[in-house]
Image: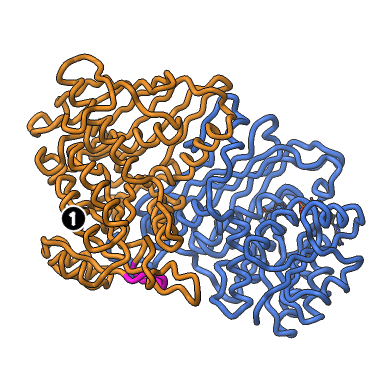
Chain colours: A orange, B blue
């Protein structure tokens, strides 16, 4: 897995890790660039087939830009971060793997199980690692919650309730062809991943209800709630709705409650905020209310894991299969919402 | 100058916090405490290289970090400065203004650094609020409200002797005095009330103070040792000509548990605690890096305000403060600088 000129070279000063960002379609691409740009241990470049979208972002961070993914890969990056529209993850991941680059892929991993499986296989065949971008695992309150569970402080976990409410994101996120669905596709996977990671078992059944009462003109579901049964009998629910109005003080959030034999614990993943109100000059302008974050940046911690794994020549976590299993729960939710009954997991790959 | 050895004087409550922070920074930690038992404990439990007297500690290190009771800061810090060592000193900088001035003058004369550990400026939520003020989010600060409340400290401790600690105002409120000054600038008048006598000296355990800043801004400060049976909390609210910021440590629990104590087992909620962050910034400055966000002059100014508050509480009169030698206007941009935020 580690080539002779790998940055993991055992002898001498480690050279910078070369990282290419593939597409800025997902806003997280700019967030990752913000964490990595200008660091002496990283060489960063970016590509986006949509130069109108990508070039201003790359210019803003002062990183070289091309509208050709092939050109970016000709630079032989050690790794790429794929932040395209969900449906285009597969083609970019396959190109990157073929070029020998390790991959960090934005969530949800893919818009079908077939695509997800193909991406995992392509990376495996090329001898590169695949990581799924689940930064919420790295948020301090969630790290603390997982520690309580993993150390046994809560005793046996019987149940869990998670939420990942957000603002309706608009753009390609509400285009079923590019996003693979609506709120269920967008916001199930973070909490689904936390549940699998914390409980350490797979989901065996999912039930879901969805609707379009919020933003009824959109072609996708805008609200949904899931109930999941895990292999050890643990019952969990997820609210994945785009329930936060524009006037809400922040984009959304993630919470997770665990009900254990010895107690209950709830993490507020993005709770490290101060309240900020602005009325403009003379307090006579428009009103703006915001919850400004002050905690450690989970994106930075996630990228640190990705980069450390590249340097150490190991598989980063969460991996491609974590991404696959989380999307499987979302796909199961769609099937259940259609049938009105629980659906058994795992799903057949061509399901 | 590369700092490789730091000597902590006073191996009690806050000394141990500093030792943990210094460890993270990769420096070798030495220690001295005038109680032999405290020395052997620090050596056995924390692996600190301990010394039998202060002179031997000062001799062995590049930087001396003073974590003793407030009335002993000056003696320890002066000994270190006179031996040519840079000093980090816990807040308050000293028990009296005379001592504070002597420390600043001695450090200037010896050409060494003197840093005062006003740690609130390094709490990320407080630092975020200050950054928002500096970015113009609230316009010109008008009314500030800061609260800091916990239970009784060790009932037999020196804390309760105002002559040693400067009491609830000098020990607790001084944190928010410094922060209010960082936000709204120099203070010209102070009025304070102290109440609820308790403890071994029957001293005040709760205090209110009203600060008038040179800008006209008003700060209302609360400090308390009366919050019995509940956890320590702090809060702030800053209202300005264009907006407001507010926060309380208990407004949004990050990890809420039943039973409540379970939450501690979840571990720290920050990569770097504020004490480690302040020590990192001080050591970097001593090694030639940028001036830290708080200086000994800020520490002296906070002490002057705290002592004026003590005087006001005793006399029942408002106390005017002399104008600052180097006026500090606070953190908000001037109206001319504010285009739009
Ligand atoms: N920034 C903060 O968050 C914070 C918090 C607590 C205390 N403090 C400040 O830190 C200082 C110490 O407070 P503490 O709570 O650690 O007190 P403490 O009583 O827990 O510890 C003080 C230690 O100093 C030792 N000591 C006393 N006189 C000494 C001397 N002359 N030489 C050497 N050692 C001596 C004592 O034996 C004791 O071990 C005070 O000035 C206090 O205001 C700051």
Read off the residue under disc 1. A92
Asked if residue B126 shows in the view, the reply is yes
- Locate the N terminus of chain B and report the quarter of the image it occupies: bottom right
Q: Is residue B155 left or right of residue B289?
A: right
Outermost top residue? A341
Q: Is residue A262 left or right of residue B229?
A: left
Relative height, residue A284 to residue B291 (above, below): above
The spot of residue A297 in percent (x, y) is 42, 53
Residue at horizontal 48 percent and vertical 46 percent from the top: B237
Relative height, residue B313 to residue B265 (above, below): below
Asked if residue B132 shows in the view, the reply is no
Front residue of this view, candidates B44 and A224: B44
Residue at horizontal 21 percent and vertical 67 percent from the top: A73
10 Å crowding of disc 1: few (<14), some (14-19), many (20+):
many
- Locate the C terminus of chain B and report the quarter of the image it occupies: bottom left
Q: Is residue B162 left or right of residue A74?
A: right
Per the rendered image, the range of residues in magenta is A37-43
What secondary structure characterizes most of the magenta part?
A: loop
The spot of residue B41 in percent (x, y) is 85, 52
Front residue of this view, candidates B147 and B113: B113
Relative height, residue B227 to residue B49 (above, below): above
Q: Is residue B38 left or right of residue A265?
A: right
The spot of residue A9 in percent (x, y) is 45, 70
Q: Is mark 1 within 8 Å of ligand 1?
A: no
**The magenta stretch spans residue B311:** no
Front residue of this view, candidates A204 and B68: A204
Residue at horizontal 16 percent and vertical 42 percent from the top: A173
**Of helix, strand and loop, which one carries label 1?**
helix
State which chain disc 1 sits on.
A
Q: What is the total number of numbered labels drawn onto the structure image? A: 1
The image quadrant of residue B241 is bottom left
For ligand 1, the image quadrant comes to: bottom right
């Amino acid at each position: 897995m580690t080539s002779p000129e790998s940055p993991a070279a055992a002898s001498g000063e480690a050279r910078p890790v070369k990282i290419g960002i593939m597409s800025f379609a997902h806003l997280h691409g700019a967030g990752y660039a913000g964490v990595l740009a200008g660091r002496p241990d990283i060489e960063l470049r970016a590509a986006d087939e949509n130069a109108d979208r990508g070039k201003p972002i790359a210019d803003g961070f002062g990183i070289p830009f091309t509208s050709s993914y092939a050109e970016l890969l000709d630079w032989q990056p050690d790794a790429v971060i794929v932040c395209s529209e969900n449906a285009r993850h597969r083609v970019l991941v396959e190109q990157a793997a073929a070029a020998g680059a390790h991959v960090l892929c934005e969530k949800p991993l893919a818009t079908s199980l077939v695509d997800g499986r193909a991406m995992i296989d392509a990376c495996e065949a090329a001898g590169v690692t695949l990581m799924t971008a689940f930064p919420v695992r790295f948020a301090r309150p969630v790290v603390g919650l997982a520690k309580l569970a993993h150390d046994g402080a809560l005793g046996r976990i019987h149940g869990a309730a998670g939420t990942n409410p957000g603002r309706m994101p608009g753009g390609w996120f509400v285009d079923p062809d590019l996003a693979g669905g609506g709120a269920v596709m967008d916001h199930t996977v973070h909490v689904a991943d936390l549940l699998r990671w914390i409980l350490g078992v797979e989901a065996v059944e999912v039930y879901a209800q969805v609707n379009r009462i919020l933003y009824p003109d959109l072609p996708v579901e805008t609200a949904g709630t899931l109930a999941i049964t895990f292999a050890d009998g643990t019952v969990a629910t997820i609210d994945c709705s785009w329930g936060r109005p524009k006037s809400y003080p922040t984009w959304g959030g993630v919470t997770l409650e665990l009900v254990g034999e010895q107690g209950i614990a709830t993490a507020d993943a993005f709770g490290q905020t101060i309240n900020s109100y602005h009325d403009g000059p003379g307090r006579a302008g428009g009103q703006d209310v915001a919850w400004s974050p002050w905690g450690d940046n989970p994106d930075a911690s996630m990228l640190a894991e990705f980069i450390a794994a590249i340097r150490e020549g190991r598989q980063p976590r969460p991996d491609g299969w974590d991404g696959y299993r989380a999307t499987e729960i979302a796909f199961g939710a769609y099937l259940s919402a259609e049938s009105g009954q629980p659906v058994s997991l795992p799903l057949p790959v061509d399901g | 100058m590369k700092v490789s050895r730091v000597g902590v004087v006073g191996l009690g409550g806050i000394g141990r916090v500093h030792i943990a922070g210094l460890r993270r920074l990769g420096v070798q930690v030495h220690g001295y405490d005038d109680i032999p038992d405290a020395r052997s404990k620090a050596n056995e439990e924390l692996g600190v290289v301990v010394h039998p007297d202060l002179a031997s500690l000062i001799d062995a290190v590049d930087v001396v970090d003073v974590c003793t009771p407030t009335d002993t800061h000056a003696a320890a810090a002066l000994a270190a400065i006179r031996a040519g060592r840079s000093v980090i000193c816990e807040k308050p900088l000293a028990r009296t203004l005379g001592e504070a001035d002597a420390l600043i003058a001695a450090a200037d004369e010896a050409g060494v650094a003197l840093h005062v550990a006003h740690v609130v400026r390094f709490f990320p939520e407080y630092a975020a609020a200050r950054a928002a003020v500096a970015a113009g989010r609230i316009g010109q600060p008008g009314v500030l409200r800061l609260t800091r409340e916990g239970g009784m400290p060790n009932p037999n401790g020196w804390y309760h002797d105002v002559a040693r600690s400067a009491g609830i105002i000098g020990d607790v409120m001084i944190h928010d005095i410094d922060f209010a000054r960082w936000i709204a600038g120099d203070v010209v008048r102070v009025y304070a009330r102290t109440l609820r006598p308790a403890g071994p000296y029957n001293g005040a355990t709760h205090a209110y103070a009203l600060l008038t800043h040179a800008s006209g801004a008003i700060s209302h400060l609360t400090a308390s040792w009366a919050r019995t049976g509940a956890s320590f909390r702090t809060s702030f609210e800053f209202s300005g000509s264009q907006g407001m910021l507010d926060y309380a440590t208990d407004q949004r629990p990050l990890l809420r548990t039943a039973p409540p104590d379970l939450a501690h087992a979840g571990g720290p909620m920050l990569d770097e605690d504020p004490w480690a962050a302040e020590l990192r910034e001080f050591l970097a400055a001593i090694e030639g890096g940028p001036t830290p966000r708080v200086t000994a002059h800020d520490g002296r100014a906070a002490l002057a305000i705290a002592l004026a508050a003590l005087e006001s509480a005793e006399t029942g009169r408002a106390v005017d403060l002399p104008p600052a030698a180097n006026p500090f206007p606070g953190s908000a941009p001037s109206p001319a600088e504010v285009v739009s935020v």
